[in-house]
Amino acid sequence: MRKTFVLLALLALALPVAGLSALRAGEGTLSVEDGRGTITIKARGGVIGRLDRGSVTIFDLSPEDANDPVVFGDDQPVQLVGDTGIRYSGLGLRYRLIGGSFRVVIAGRGIDLSAVGKGTGTIRGELDAFDTGLYSLDGVDCRKEPDSCKPLPDRVQRFQLGTPERPEKSPGPPTPS
């Protein structure tokens, strides 16, 4: 129990530092507080969070690196999704994906997450929910400043996490001398 607490405390300290350095590198942030719906992120970077009830499906897009996803609290059998996806579900899930490329789908109630990186995603609140929770892109921590955040939208909304990567320019044809 003590090791888990120490690990979570270190992660809580590390993510804001990673977020500050990420902003300098052109990466973006996403903060969700008590969300109720579905959030999909396809990015290179990090995500740390928890949800009260639901599922987390992780597709590791860089399986050869040393960065493995970590999930705690899954009380249902793990399900394989496609060739590379793993779905964890249950009550009180905690998850961490630090480094590497990934696609993660978080669906459920009580979604709290912080993401830092470069990529894309979608966000949608639960249709019949009175309160869908709050989110912020490249902005504030919704836990600390809820008035500066928006409610999860009732329709699928796409978002860009950080600045889009631009393809390298080809040198073009040589100029005549």
Image (cartoon, rainbow, N blue to C red):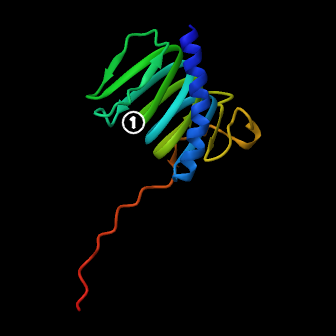
Residue 50 spot, x, y in % from top left: 56, 23
**Would residue 125 be visible to someone looking at this image?**
no
* Quarter of image, res 34: top right
* Quarter of image, res 89: top left
The residue drawn where x is 57% and y is 43% is 29
Per the image, the residue denoted by label 1 is 102
> Across the whole image, how many numbered discs are drawn on residues?
1
Viewer-closest of 138 and 150: 138
Which quadrant of the figure contains the C terminus? bottom left
* Quarter of image, res 110: top right
Which quadrant of the figure contains the N terminus? top right
Viewer-closest of 160 and 44: 44
Viewer-closest of 156 and 75: 75
**Height in image: 177 above or below 137?**
below
Horizontal relation, residue 7 to residue 139: left or right: left
Amino acid on which disc 1 is placed: Phe
**Would residue 106 be visible to someone looking at this image?**
yes
Viewer-closest of 140 and 82: 140
Q: Determine crowd level at label 1: few under 14, some 14-19, many 20+ residues with C-alpha closer than 10 A.
A: many
**Height in image: 22 above or below 34?**
below
The residue drawn where x is 68% and y is 28% is 130
Horizontal relation, residue 49 to residue 97: left or right: right
Horizontal relation, residue 33 to residue 74: left or right: right
- Label 1, secondary structure: give it: strand
Horizontal relation, residue 104 to residue 153: left or right: left
The residue drawn where x is 45% and y is 30% is 97
Residue 59 spot, x, y in % from top left: 36, 31
Residue 114 spot, x, y in % from top left: 57, 34
Residue 109 spot, x, y in % from top left: 58, 22
